């Protein structure tokens, strides 16, 4: 069943179009990567799915319901962005509990979910620290924890690893892939990094100047790139 469906989505800022006629279906459990050069519209597309950006034209469906006018908070999505934006004055425990408190989840359940999430991401030992007492990678894991604590059906990432050094980036890729396997949820992941796209995705969406150039598995894109642009971007020999 389709978790997310985009039908003829267009977006313009003022008179400047940034996304044109985007059609895309994302099925439950897929790991979809939006890839493309800077300015190609990846973040705008993700933010529209997340409800942080208005859609100029077209329909966005989540679970087969049109959500163009549904608030971000009511879409049950988890989001992680490049800047982690943890609450600096709150401990890790409070940061994790915050989305549940906002959703009026009862205390017992909050306690259990925070413990489960901390265990999954191996941040149990950091629960009483403040964000400034954490390393970049630890902060990143807390940000992911905060996004999954409500058990969202769909999970959105916008270049979540781009501020990390190479070694940590590789570790976090593995961790996110593991998380996807464990949770079995749908992940939509934005990156401008080809390696990240090729290693993490089961479906890659290549964007260029606000258009979809090609959609396919890493294998498809590598062996049958639809254009010279895709071939060049993916690093395929053609
Ligand atoms: P990407 O994430 O692929 O780098 P973006 O989605 O951020 O691309 O941006 C796509 C295009 O939309 C770019 O040309 C960018 O300058 C423009 N853009 C993004 N946000 C805004 C905004 N708030 N106002 C005007 N133009 C914007
Ligand atoms: Mg971006």
Image (cartoon, rainbow, N blue to C red):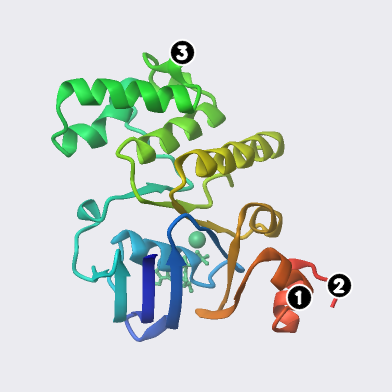
Judging depth in this view, the residue of 16 and 105 nearest the camera is 105
Please give left or right for residue 213 compared with residue 146 in the image: right
Q: Mark 2, residues whose alpha carbon is within 10 Å: few (<14), some, or many (≥20)? A: few
Q: Which mark is residue 125?
A: 3
Q: Nearer the viewer, residue 44 or 116?
A: 116
Earlier along the polypeptide chain: callout 3 or callout 2? 3
Q: Which quarter of the picture shows residue 17?
A: bottom left
Residue 231 has which mark?
Answer: 1
Tag 2, which secondary structure? loop
Q: Secondary structure at mark 3?
A: helix
- Where is residue 227 drawn, in percent x and y? 71, 84
Q: Judging from the image, what secondary structure is the residue with disc 1 in?
A: helix
Residue drawn where x is 17% and y is 37% of the image: 102
Q: Earlier in the sequence, mark 3 or mark 1?
A: 3
Residue identified by numbered label 2: 237
Image quadrant of ligand 1? Answer: bottom left
Name the foreground residue: 202 vs 124: 202
Q: Residue at x 27, y 28 (%)?
A: 97
């Amino acid at each position: 069943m389709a978790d997310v469906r985009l039908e003829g989505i267009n977006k313009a800022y003022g008179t400047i179009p940034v996304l044109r006629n985007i059609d895309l279906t994302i099925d439950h459990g897929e790991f979809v990567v939006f890839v493309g050069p800077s300015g190609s519209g990846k973040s705008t597309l993700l933010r529209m799915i997340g409800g942080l950006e208005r859609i100029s034209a077209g329909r966005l469906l989540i679970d087969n319901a049109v959500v163009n006018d549904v608030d971000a908070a009511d879409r049950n999505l988890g989001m992680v962005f490049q800047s982690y934006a943890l609450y600096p004055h709150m401990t890790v425990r409070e940061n994790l509990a915050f989305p549940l408190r906002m959703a009026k989840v009862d205390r017992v359940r909050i306690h259990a979910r925070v413990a489960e999430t901390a265990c999954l991401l191996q941040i149990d030992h950091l629960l009483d620290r403040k964000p400034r007492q954490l390393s970049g990678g630890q902060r990143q894991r807390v940000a992911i924890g905060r996004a999954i604590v409500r058990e969202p059906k769909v999970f959105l990432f916008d270049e979540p690893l781009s501020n990390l050094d190479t070694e940590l980036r590789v570790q976090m890729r593995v961790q996110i892939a593991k998380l996807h396997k464990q949770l079995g949820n749908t992940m939509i992941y934005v990156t401008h990094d080809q390696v990240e796209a090729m290693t993490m995705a089961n479906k890659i969406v290549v964007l260029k100047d606000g258009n979809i150039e090609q959609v396919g598995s890493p294998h498809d894109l590598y062996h049958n790139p639809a254009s010279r642009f895709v071939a060049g971007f993916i690093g395929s020999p053609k």
